[in-house]
Image (cartoon, grey):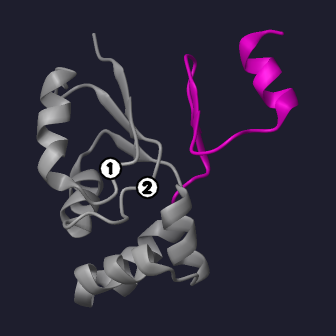
């Protein structure tokens, strides 16, 4: 039986991603959901993005760092990511533009940031 495994805020730290996925016992048939912020201050944003783009059963929702790249807002972290992505930066930003702001299935709703209070009450049945 496949599971939904939710992780977040990797921030370009590809070196710890395999260890994390091993700890949760990720299986090939599991759905892997990222709450966003694949990129950030870490040394390997390209490897993180490639991992999620190439995994057939992975979903990435828009995080604040992806949104800042899409909007062209550059702080120190965004500039570092741009430099580390090099020639693949423009194509990566185009991919980021396609990311949904939330993921939902029959068991869970995943967003990077807070939702409207009425939507949260609906999920929790309050």
Position of residue 31 measured from the top left corner of the image (x, y, whole percent): 34, 30
Element under label 2?
loop
Q: Are marks 2 and 1 in contact (CB under 8 Å)?
A: yes
Q: Residue at x 34, y 57 (%)?
A: 11
Q: Earlier in the sequence, mark 2 or mark 1?
A: 1
Give the labeled residue for mark 2.
Answer: 37
Q: Quadrant of residue 84?
A: bottom left
Give the labeled residue for mark 1.
Answer: 10
Q: Residue at x 56, y 22 (%)?
A: 108
Q: Residue furthest front?
A: 76
Q: Is residue 6 toward the left or the right of residue 116 in the image?
A: left
Q: Spatial distance from mark 2 to mark 1, Cα to Cα? A: 6 Å
Q: Residue at x 24, y 90 (%)?
A: 87
Position of residue 90 measured from the top left corner of the image (x, y, whole percent): 38, 86
Element under label 1?
loop
Dot 1: few (<14), some (14–19), or many (≥20) neighbours within 10 Å? many
Position of residue 59 measured from the top left corner of the image (x, y, whole percent): 41, 44
Q: Which residues are magenta?
A: 99-126
């Amino acid at each position: 039986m496949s599971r939904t495994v939710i992780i977040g805020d990797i921030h370009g730290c590809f070196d710890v991603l395999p260890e994390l996925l091993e700890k949760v016992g990720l299986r090939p048939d599991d759905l892997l959901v990222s709450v966003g912020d694949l990129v950030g201050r870490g040394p390997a944003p390209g490897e993180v993005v490639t991992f999620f783009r190439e995994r057939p059963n992975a979903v990435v929702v828009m995080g604040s760092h992806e949104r800042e790249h899409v909007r062209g807002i550059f702080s120190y972290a965004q500039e570092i990511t741009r430099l580390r992505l090099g020639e693949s930066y423009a194509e990566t930003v185009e991919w980021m533009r396609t990311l949904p702001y939330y993921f939902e299935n029959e068991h869970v709703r995943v967003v990077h940031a807070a939702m409207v209070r009425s939507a949260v009450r609906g999920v929790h049945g309050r």
